[in-house]
Image (spheres, grey):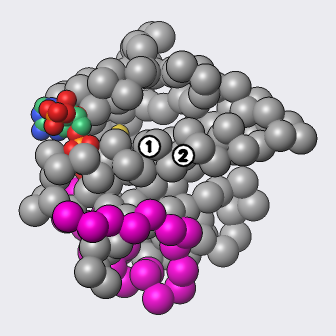
Amino acid sequence: MSIAIRQMEDKDVEEVVSLEASSFLHPWPRKEVLYELHENPCALVYVAEEKGTIVGYIDFMITFDSATISRLAVAALTRKKGVGTLLLTRLLEICCAQKEEPVEWVTLEVRRSNEAALALYKKNGFREVTVKKGYYDDGEDAIYMIRSVIA
Ligand SMILES: CC(C)(COP(=O)(O)OP(=O)(O)OC[C@H]1O[C@@H](n2cnc3c(N)ncnc32)[C@H](O)[C@@H]1OP(=O)(O)O)[C@@H](O)C(=O)NCCC(=O)NCCS
């Protein structure tokens, strides 16, 4: 499997919207994806591409000394092959490269029921800090996780 991780471009929008739709209970609509790509000044969006097809993406924000993961998704047929880990690794590389305003922490929220994501994050050095009760619109709790950029 040959995967390239690169910054998202306009040509990727439709594939990322499809990935959203097939990955999340409450997927972001096109306008939200476009907002992240073009308008959110803090957002960085990277895609994983295999033979010209988008098989994963990560959207995160860097603010001062921390980065926060907003979205991470891998296409169903490509899961459990290391793509999620590759996207997290790129995020950490980008954080490490911020020399003027060093990024020290990466944080995220994940649904309590999302065993795959919880396992992925734990395997990649994140630890549970707290539970945010009823964090999601449907009332599910979020697990708030953190890791330092330098493990
Ligand atoms: C969570 C998600 C991004 C994982 O992506 P992935 O490319 O499959 O992850 P990786 O292949 O890098 O997995 C790395 C490790 O995570 C854990 N993991 C991943 N998927 C898992 C699953 N379904 N069950 C248990 N552990 C899992 C394993 O420890 C795995 O290591 P291993 O393959 O050596 O066992 C993917 O399942 C996904 O897109 N889910 C839907 C969207 C989502 O929930 N996003 C996260 C929102 S917070």
How crowded pointer 1 is (Cα within 10 Å; few <14, some 14-19, many 20+) is rated as some
The residue identified by callout 2 is: 91
In depth, the one of 31 and 16 nearer the eye is 16
Residue at figure coordinates x 66%, y 74% from the top left? 38
Task: Name the side, left or right, on which 85 lies relative to 23.
Answer: right
Q: Is residue 110 magenta?
A: no
The residue identified by callout 1 is: 88
Task: Name the side, left or right, on which 57 lies relative to 98.
Answer: left
Tag 2 near tag 1, CB within 8 Å: yes
Residue at figure coordinates x 54%, y 46% from the top left? 91
Q: Residue furthest front?
A: 2
Residue 20 position in % (x across, y down):
31, 64
One can see residue 90 in this view: yes
Q: Residue furthest bottom?
A: 11
One can see residue 116 in this view: no
Residue at figure coordinates x 51%, y 49% from the top left? 90
Give the residues in magenta.
1-23
Tell me the quadrant of the picture where the N terminus can be found. bottom left
Residue 39 position in % (x across, y down):
70, 70
Residue 89 position in % (x across, y down):
46, 43
Task: Name the side, left or right, on which 59 lies relative to 98.
Answer: left
Secondary element under disc 1, as helix, strand or loop, is helix
Above or below, comparing residue 16 to residue 92 in the picture: below
